[in-house]
Amino acid sequence: MQLEYLPITKSKNKKDRFIIELGKDNYIFEVYWNPIGKYFAFNMFDVDENSIILGRKITYNINMLDNIIDTRVPDLIILPVDPSVEHKKITYDNFMDSVKCYILSNGGGG
């Protein structure tokens, strides 16, 4: 089975902006590198460009949508991990190489 993941194109200089269907709705993601903190972060918007999540750090093995209280957030898990378990943290070099942001069902009924 092929796992689905966010189609991020990493860059040290500009945000990667894309639209993706999650659940029944489309969302706009912006993923960018923070050179001071040396981490990736993201913004998430609805299709009308209303902000849902702004400036959230992408952390290894932590659901990117965890603890967001907003009815527009899909009932999914987006988990940045390395399936080979070779890496246990996100770096610029391994992000979107061995570490990807996998989209998983939350198992909820929503």
Image (spheres, helix red, strand yellow):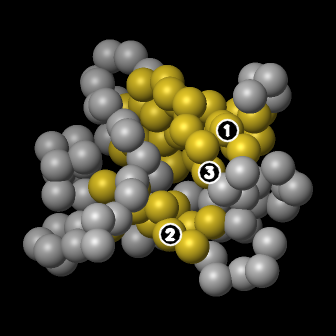
Q: Amino acid at mark 1?
A: Asn
Q: Amino acid at mark 2?
A: Leu
Q: Are marks 3 and 1 in contact (CB under 8 Å)?
A: yes
According to the image, label 2 marks what residue?
A: 104
Q: Where's residue 17, x and y in %?
A: 49, 24
3 or 2: tag closer to the N-terminus: 3
Name the residue located 28 percent from the left edge and 24 percent from the top edge.
Answer: 12
Residue 75 in the figure: left or right of residue 9: right
SS type, badge 1: strand
Q: Quadrant of residue 37?
A: top left
Q: Are marks 1 and 2 in contact (CB under 8 Å)?
A: no
1 or 2: tag closer to the N-terminus: 1
According to the image, label 3 marks what residue?
A: 22
Q: Quadrant of residue 93?
A: top left
Q: How many numbered marks are there?
A: 3
Gap between marks 3 and 2 measured at Cα: 10 Å
Location of residue 93 with respect to 47 vertically, above or below: below
According to the image, label 1 marks what residue?
A: 26
Q: Amino acid at mark 3?
A: Leu
- Where, quadrant-wise, is the C terminus in this rendering? bottom right
